[in-house]
Image (cartoon, rainbow, N blue to C red):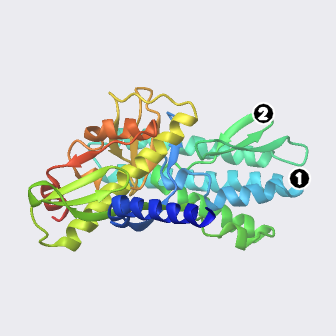
Amino acid sequence: MHTCHHLFCSIALLILLCVHGTDVAAYEPYRFRIDEPRIVIYPDVYLAPARLQNTRLFRLARQVQEQSRDRLVEFVKISLEEMAAVYHEEALQARHKAMQETNDRNKLIRWSGNAEAFANQLQARSLRVNRNSHVELYFESFGELYLLIDGKPVLVSSPVINQQESLERRIIEQVCRRMHCDQRLINQPVEEPVRSLWVYAGWEIGENNRHLFRTKSGLNFVFNDLEDKPVKQHICLNIARDLNLIADTLINVREKGLFIDWSYLYLDVIPGTDRYQLVINQFKDAIQLSLTAIPYLNDYPQVTIPWLQARLKFEPFEFTFENAAQLVKELSK
């Protein structure tokens, strides 16, 4: 009886493999290394890399914050001095430019005067800071560093927005010249979190002898022929990679309690970066992520919303790209 039971189980397993084996075996695993997506709540979007809290100045400031009060005071004084020097230089440049310009002369003269006045204020503040001053550092969530001096905030910023890195470099050089700095900590490379994403896919013959590149997640691509098959497969995998990444991140978004408005969903590039953001509602909440294919296609991911909705419900859903050849043509340009 025991032997018969094992025989029955073996036969049953063989039948299951015969019925489903080709379908399962057709899928091959493809691994993608991806940057971890970021969920951002408006207005915490469009953050340029230089403004994020992983800058060298932020790391130095956090070092100083853990050291003696005298060093904190020195850091504040140096920051004020370097900012004052930068604003003095900007005022001087504006005056020189005003002598050469005719159309913007009055504007340049006003800007020069304002920059000079602010530089003088910063210099005076630096002279007033001493051991009896109440000084703190405040790290703002949008990537800005404030000096709190006797309760009054001073933003560490350059007069020219795209020269912030230059100002920060000057402060770091002066601070590290006057006191000990852990250069390894300041200069350590900031690594974006990376994880793996798997796409399971394979080729099969569909209806009317058409060729189907099918993925286990329900995304299917139809072709009339297998000409340039490696190119077709590569592009289909990248489209599947992008859409699976979006689906996985939307699941995370929902779990965090953010509202997804399917009628408002749209994709946009993040200026100054190679990343994209998918805005998920009218409040401009979004996910930032690295995409490889769908930003270059029309109406994606909007046309796949039924597939995305099913993924969020963990329900099977087939979405077929009937125009897969055209998609490959678009992405091969």
Q: Say which quarter of the image contains residue 134.
A: top right
Q: Residue flagged by tag 1: what amino acid is it?
A: Arg
Q: Earlier in the sequence, mark 1 or mark 2?
A: 1
Determine which residue is flagged by label 2.
151
Relative to 218, residue 28 above or below: below
Q: Quadrant of the N terminus?
A: bottom right
Residue under the point 45% across and 54% down: 162
Residue under the point 37% across and 51% down: 217
User: How crowded is the residue under tag 1: few (<14 C-alpha within 10 Å), some, or many (20+)?
Assistant: some
* Residue 250 showing in the rendered view: yes
Q: Secondary structure at mark 2?
A: loop
Q: Secondary structure at mark 1?
A: helix
Q: Nearer the viewer, residue 168 or 138?
A: 138
Q: Residue flagged by tag 2: what amino acid is it?
A: Gly
User: How crowded is the residue under tag 2: few (<14 C-alpha within 10 Å), some, or many (20+)?
Assistant: few
Residue under the point 30% across and 65% down: 202
Q: Which mark is residue 33?
A: none
Determine which residue is flagged by label 1.
69
* Residue 45 showing in the rendered view: no
Relative to 288, residue 10 above or below: below
Left/right placement of residue 319 relative to residue 333 reads right
Q: Nearer the viewer, residue 169 or 210?
A: 210
How far apart marks 1 and 2 lie (CA) works out to: 16 Å
Pinpoint residue 17: horizontal percent, then vertical percent.
Answer: 40, 63
Q: Residue furthest front?
A: 1
Pinpoint residue 150: horizontal percent, then vertical percent.
Answer: 81, 36
Relative to 237, residue 249 above or below: above
Residue under the point 43% across and 32% down: 284
Q: Nearer the viewer, residue 30 or 246?
A: 30
Pinpoint residue 158: horizontal percent, then vertical percent.
Answer: 54, 50
